[in-house]
Image (cartoon, rainbow, N blue to C red):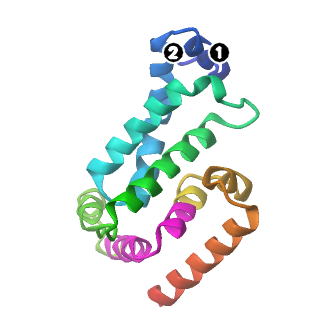
Amino acid sequence: MRNIQEAELIAQSLNGDTHAYGELVDRYKNAVYYHCFAIVRDEAAAEDIAQETFVRAYYSLAKYNPDYRLSTWLFTISTNQCLSYIKKAKREVPSASKLLENVEAQNPSPQKNAEHAELHAAVDRLQPNYRAVISLYYWQGLNYAEVAQVMGVPLNSVRVWLKRAKEVLRKELT
């Protein structure tokens, strides 16, 4: 089933083929989870939000516009879910301590660990919108227009948020 084109999988999913939708989930589950984690910084919440993203996407698949990449649409849903989660929680997002433990376990270089830890800790301190644009642009590889679409904001907002986020990070990391 790996060779089947995305459009065909979507069509099959719309016809009730749960295996085809499962294939779509398999293709995007890691990217959606890591995007959610980059915003909420909580493994359990990121897993729940990623799962909810795919449930919502399944029930809204008929509304999907094939002019855009499916990943962009999924990131839109997950970003909105993450920002709602943060609003509802009315608390500061936890630090990257769990992430850093994982980074240290996977990356044996002490210098790389320190750099990675410092960067992620600094990103953790950014406001949620800044964390979201950093994740979408740098870690998920979306362009400005796609980030704007995902976030539901004007293109210039994305440019400003990225610029401000980089300024804050530059100040913190120097």
| Highlighted range, magenta | 112-134
SS of the residue at dot 1? Answer: helix
CB atoms of marks 2 and 1 within 8 Å: yes
Q: Is 84 located above or below residue 161 in the figure?
A: above
Q: Is 17 located above or below residue 22 in the figure?
A: above
Q: Was residue 126 drawn as part of the magenta stretch in this picture?
A: yes
Task: Identify the residue shown where x is 75% and y is 68%.
Answer: 156
- By secondary structure, the bulk of the magenta-drawn segment is best described as helix
Task: Identify the residue shown where x is 55% and y is 65%.
Answer: 134
The disc label shown at residue 20, or none: 2
Q: Position of residue 93 (x, y in %)?
A: 34, 67
**Kind of residue sitting beneath label 1:** Glu
**Image check: 35 left or right of 12?**
left
| Distance from the alpha carbon under mark 2 to that under mark 1 | 9 Å
The disc label shown at residue 70, or none: none
**Kind of residue sitting beneath label 2:** Ala
Label 1 neighbour load within 10 Å: few <14, some 14-19, many 20+: few
Q: Is 10 located above or below residue 52 in the figure?
A: above
Query: Which of pointers 2 and 1 lies earlier in the amino acid sequence?
Result: 1
Which residue is more in the foreground, 58 or 2? 58
Which residue is more in the foreground, 123 or 82? 82
Any part of residue 4 in sight: no
SS of the residue at dot 2? Answer: helix
| Residue identifier under label 1 | 8
